[in-house]
Image: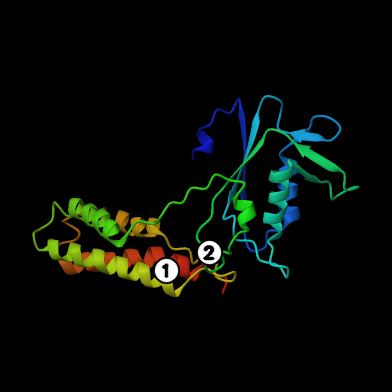
């Protein structure tokens, strides 16, 4: 979203989503398709512009026999040396100008792998810690409290119980079903809880008249959100 808000007259953006099957050649082709030749061996975006390459899921590529990740090794060369070799012709060197790199990744685990620290040293690194359980309880309890303000007092106990059960289910799924190459859709995050609560906030007193009916609505929203993630896996 930040990159989309940058002035278009001065910036071009390139988004690359890494996966377990991404190769170094895939990354090189994507970059080559986004730059143009400036002189004999120098390439870059149109003169007067910056190319911002955003790499998502940076640590998803598989680790090869030698303990390296090909796309990461290629990016380390491109960033550290300011270019790469033309592998489609005579291995001539291509200089890159006015190209910057931004990357994002989750903590290692499941299908995500540890990344070469020498590659990370080329970035300014910012870590965003996940919210604590107490923070999540507070956030979603307030959402339900506001949504149920027009319902009866008997819904108060249901609100507290549902929030605790929702977080227990979320933590159970996150722990027992980590993402793998064959089940890459197993990526659970608080946005999934928010989608469940978005459905709950649409309830009205005339349609949901008892706490039991509200619990049934919660169950249906959980099935809608989380079953979609579980059953779209190729496994």
Q: At 73% across and 40% down in the image, what residue appears?
A: 82
Q: Which mark is residue 60?
A: none
Instruction: Name the colour scheme.
Output: rainbow
Residues 120 and 168: in front is 120
Task: Give the quarter of the figure containing the C terminus.
Answer: bottom right
Residues 171 and 74: in front is 74
Q: At 38% across and 58% down in the image, what residue appears?
A: 190
What percent of the width, then of the height, locates residue 94? 81, 40
Residue furthest to the right in view is 90
Task: Residue 117: name its quadrant.
Answer: bottom right
Q: Secondary structure at mark 1?
A: helix
**Badge 1 density bin: few <14, some 14–19, many ≥20, Cα 10 Å:** some
**Badge 2 density bin: few <14, some 14–19, many ≥20, Cα 10 Å:** few
- On screen, 98 above or below 229? above
Q: Which mark is residue 108?
A: 2
- On screen, 15 above or below 215? above
Label whose residue precedes the other's in the sequence (1 or 2) = 2
Q: Which mark is residue 174?
A: 1
What percent of the width, then of the height, locates residue 51? 65, 35
Q: Secondary structure at mark 2?
A: loop
Q: At 64% across and 54% down in the image, what residue appears?
A: 118
Mark toward the viewer: 1 or 2 = 2
Q: Is residue 232 left or right of residue 117?
A: left
Q: At 46% across and 51% down in the image, what residue appears?
A: 127
What percent of the width, then of the height, locates residue 85? 82, 47
Q: CA–CA distance between discs 1 and 2? A: 14 Å
Q: Is residue 147 visible?
A: yes
Task: Residue 169: name its quadrant.
Answer: bottom left
Asked if disc 1 and disc 2 are in contact, CB closer than 8 Å, the reply is no
């Amino acid at each position: 979203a930040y990159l989309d808000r940058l002035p278009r007259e001065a910036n071009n953006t390139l988004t690359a989503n890494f996966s377990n099957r991404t190769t170094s050649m895939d990354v090189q082709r994507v970059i080559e398709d986004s730059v143009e030749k400036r002189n004999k061996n120098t390439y870059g975006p149109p003169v007067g512009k910056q190319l911002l390459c955003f790499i998502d899921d940076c640590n998803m590529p598989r680790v090869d026999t030698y303990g390296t990740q090909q796309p990461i090794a290629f990016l380390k060369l491109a960033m550290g040396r300011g270019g790469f070799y033309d592998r489609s012709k005579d291995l001539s060197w291509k200089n890159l100008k006015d190209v910057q790199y931004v990357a994002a990744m989750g903590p290692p685990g499941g299908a995500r792998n540890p990344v070469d620290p020498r590659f990370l040293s080329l970035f300014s690194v910012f870590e965003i810690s996940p919210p604590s359980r107490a923070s999540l309880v507070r956030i979603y309890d307030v959402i339900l409290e506001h949504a149920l303000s027009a319902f009866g007092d008997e819904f108060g106990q249901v609100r507290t119980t549902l929030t605790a059960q929702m977080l227990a289910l979320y933590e159970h799924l996150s722990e027992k079903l980590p993402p793998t190459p064959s089940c890459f859709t197993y990526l659970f995050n608080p946005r999934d809880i928010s989608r469940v609560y978005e459905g709950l906030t649409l309830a009205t007193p005339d349609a949901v008249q008892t706490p039991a009916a509200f619990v049934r609505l919660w169950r249906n929203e959980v099935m809608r959100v989380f079953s979609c993630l579980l059953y779209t896996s190729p496994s």
